[in-house]
């Protein structure tokens, strides 16, 4: 973490004695690391929620931590759990009907569509982005990607499908910026 381990350990010990100021400092100190870790394990749109929920859990349960040295590992475990929980929730959401999704995409200006596509790709976790780039930009076959990555073709197909679903969800989250106001009726 960005703060020397001894300082962080002292904060944890102070929190365990009930020092609320130390708790606030500890949460601030670990927030940057929490965000970096969440970016690696969460969908980009879930990072803030995962970090917020994780820090809330940490603030409630840190007093029960037996060893201050275990804090980082525990923090990252909590974040990973929250990322998985949010990913499961995303999968349960009702998808838009295809006609409505196509309609939304058709009414976007081309420049805006390109920017959104780049942002969607950048939001992908690295292992998803890699297969999308190899398949759609380098135009490799599934077999070639599997050979290059040393993984079974079925795993590559599955990862590519999930990556495309995430890009689609990202693109469909777009909302027009010019909505009519209620007062304009």
Image (cartoon, grey):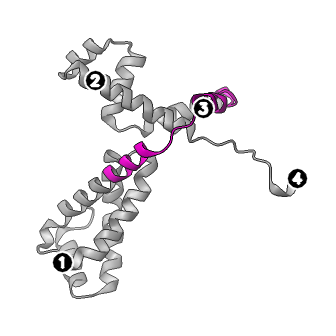
User: Image quarter for residue 57?
Assistant: bottom left
N-terminal-most mark, 2 or 3: 3
**Magenta stretch encompasses residue 5:** no
State the residue position of label 1.
64
Residue beneath disc 4 = 185
Check if residue 85 falls in the magenta segment: yes
As rendered, which of 6 and 182 lies closer to the eye? 182
Q: CA distance from mark 2 to mark 1?
A: 42 Å
Q: Residue 18: give x, y in percent of width and height.
A: 26, 88
Q: Residues within 10 Å of mark 3 (few under 14, many from 20)?
A: some
Vertical order, 33 against 132 (above or below)? below
Where's residue 121, x and y in %? Answer: 45, 33
Distance between the alpha carbons at the discs numbered 4 and 1: 57 Å
| Depth order, front residue of 23/93 | 93
Element under disc 4: loop
Count of numbered badges drawn on the protein: 4
Residue 121 seen from this side: no
Instruction: Mark 4 vs mark 1: give the one in front.
Output: 4
Distance, label 2 to label 3, CA atoms, is: 26 Å
Give the residue at mark 2: 156
Quadrant in which the N terminus appears: bottom left
Q: Residue sitting at 75 percent across and 44 percent down?
A: 178
**Between 169 and 108, the one nearer to me in the picture:** 169
Q: Which residues are magenta?
A: 84-110
Residue at figure coordinates x 51%, y 38% from the top left: 95
């Amino acid at each position: 973490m960005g703060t020397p381990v001894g300082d962080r350990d002292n904060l944890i010990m102070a929190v365990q004695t009930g020092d609320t100021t130390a708790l606030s400092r500890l949460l601030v100190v670990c927030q940057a690391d929490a965000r970096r870790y969440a970016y690696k394990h969460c969908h980009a749109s879930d990072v803030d929620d995962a970090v917020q929920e994780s820090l809330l859990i940490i603030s409630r349960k840190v007093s029960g931590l037996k060893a201050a040295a275990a804090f980082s590992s525990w923090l990252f475990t909590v974040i990973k759990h929250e990322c998985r929980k949010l990913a499961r929730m995303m999968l349960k959401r009702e998808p838009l009907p295809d006609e409505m999704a196509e309609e939304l995409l058709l009414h976007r200006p081309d420049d805006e569509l390109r920017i959104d596509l780049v942002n969607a790709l950048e939001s992908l976790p690295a292992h998803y982005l890699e297969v999308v780039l190899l398949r759609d930009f380098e135009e490799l076959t599934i077999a070639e990607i599997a050979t290059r990555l040393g993984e079974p073709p079925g795993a590559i197909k599955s990862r590519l499908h999930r990556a495309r679903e995430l890009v689609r969800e990202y693109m469909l989250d777009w909302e027009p910026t010019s909505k009519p106001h209620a007062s304009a009726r």
